[in-house]
Image (cartoon, rainbow, N blue to C red):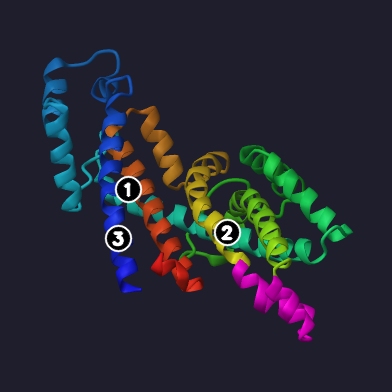
Amino acid sequence: MLKYLIKRLLMAIPTVIGITIIVFMIIHFIPGDPIQIMFGRAPDPVQIENLRRFYGLDKPLYIQYFIWLNNILHGNLGRSIQLGLPIFDLIIERFSRTVLLCIIGMIVSLCISFPTGIIAASRYNKWQDLVASTACLILISIPSFWLGILLIIVFAVYLHIFPSVGYVSPSVNLYDFLRHIALPALTLGAALAAVSARILRVSLLEVLTQDYITLAKAKGASEKRVLFVHALRNALIPTITIVGMQTGYVLGGAIVIERVFAYPGMGLLLISAIFNRDYPLIQGAVLVFAITFVVVNLVTDLIYALIDPKIRYE
């Protein structure tokens, strides 16, 4: 297991280096000058040149990259051009909120997808399977922003159960925190649940046709034991793959969801940075998103190895 872990870590290093290069270069190809945007229509050439020198924008791109990379390795993501604050502090505050939203969204997704997929597979071609499959197809087809607006109309405007926008820290008021995050988390987790449920249903149906399942039934094992003990564990590998890949969707989808619900997380911070051409802040935010995705994929690979030991030796 240790050798497998070291191998995966070594494979992740060039990926992270490639991410830093791509993030740095793409940001500098975006049209617009953030320094001139700060001064509006009447820029002061002397102040512009001083700020360019302060942020290192007067140096060649390759030198800017190595300076930026060196600062990152020392835990310094720079300062926001628009806000003038340390980017690390801005990201830490917003990233924790986005992580909370993503975790609760994934919990909602798993709580919906696992029972739905198991029921659909165990009641194949019956009305339960038909209802579950139809509901999953509808959720997959609905854009997340449209679903979020629909939930706001139903639960915030008409029923007045949940607030439509805003955020309250759980350390301040846990009840208000749950009320504010309920609709964003449900919106984020609904489409994920539909995809995971369909994959789990297909995997379970395939596993239930295997010979060892027939043997377990012939030995007198109950239907529940066959389903949950013998079949479910082997059907989890494709589902875990999808859940791991969905992390990227969760991080990307959170940007749209945070915009719809005015949720002050990383997504809203990134959108504001893009509008203001705040290069250092865009680079820091995108880098955090990308590295988080790499880390989650690494954790997913380790979970594979724990569930199926054969993966460690392939």
What separation in Å lies between label 2 and label 1 (alpha carbons)? 37 Å
Which type of secondary structure does the marked residue at label 3 adopt? helix
Q: Which numbered disc, 3 or 1, marks the residue that appears first in the sequence?
A: 3
Q: CA distance from mark 2 to mark 3?
A: 22 Å
Image-quadrant location for residue 282: top left
Q: x, y (%) of residue 131?
A: 83, 54
- Residue 83 in view here: no
Three-letter amino acid code of the residue under disc 3: Leu
**Image quarter in which the C terminus is found:** bottom left
Residue toward you, 157 or 224: 224
User: Is 217 contained in the magenta span?
Assistant: yes
- Residue with the mark numbered 3: 9
Q: Which range is magenta?
A: 211-234
Please tell me in which quadrant of the rendered image residue 129 appears. bottom right
The single residue placed furthest to the top in the displayed view is 42
Name the residue tied to disc 1. Answer: 90
Label ID, residue 238: 2
Q: Earlier in the sequence, mark 2 or mark 3?
A: 3
